[in-house]
Amino acid sequence: MAVKGTLVINKEKCKGCAVCTTGCPQNVIALSKNVNSKGYNYLEMTNEDACIGCANCAILCPDGVLEVYRVKL
């Protein structure tokens, strides 16, 4: 059974530490070239179709800026 995942990222709270990117097995997330109002490069999904909703990124995030959702296909 296939699973599709997606992330909701609080871009304003993200401080761009990139800890979450190390845990993504599908390389779905990366730091944006854009910055938030605090001047940090925030997290963004770069390959949305590859996300499996494993939530590794949310578990690793020290600031809790990620919400992960999964849908069975």
Image (spheres, rainbow, N blue to C red):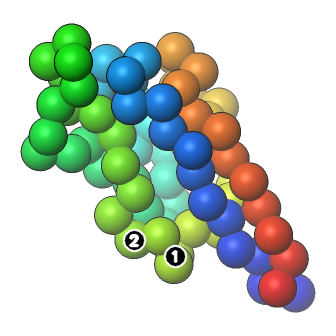
How far across and down, in percent of the image, does residue 69 sit? 74, 54
**On screen, 62 above or below 46?**
above
Instruction: List the residue tagged with mark 2.
Output: 47
* Name of the residue lying farthest toward the front: 37
Check contact, mark 2 vs mark 1: CB within 8 A. Answer: yes
62 sits to left or right of 6: left
The residue that appears at 40% across and 43% down in the rendered structure is: 22
Query: As shown in the figure, which amino acid type bears the numbered disc 1?
Result: Ala
**On screen, 45 above or below 43?**
below
Judge the density around disc 1: few (<14), some (14-19), many (≥20) Cα neighbours within 10 Å.
some
Residue 56 picture quarter: top right
> Quadrant of the image for the N terminus?
bottom right
Judge the density around disc 2: few (<14), some (14-19), many (≥20) Cα neighbours within 10 Å.
few
Residue 27: in sight, yes or no? no
Query: As shown in the figure, which amino acid type bears the numbered disc 2?
Result: Asn
55 sits to left or right of 29: right
43 sits to left or right of 20: left
How far across and down, in percent of the image, does residue 25 sit? 51, 61
Q: SS of the residue at dot 2?
A: loop
**On screen, 69 above or below 3?**
above
The residue that appears at 39% across and 44% down in the rendered structure is: 21
Taking depth in this image into account, of 47 and 54 the one nearest to the observer is 47
Instruction: List the residue tagged with mark 1.
Output: 50
Q: For marks 2 and 1, give the CA distance.
A: 6 Å
How far across and down, in percent of the image, does residue 45 sit? 40, 57
The residue that appears at 29% across and 33% down in the rendered structure is: 42
**On screen, 52 above or below 38?**
below
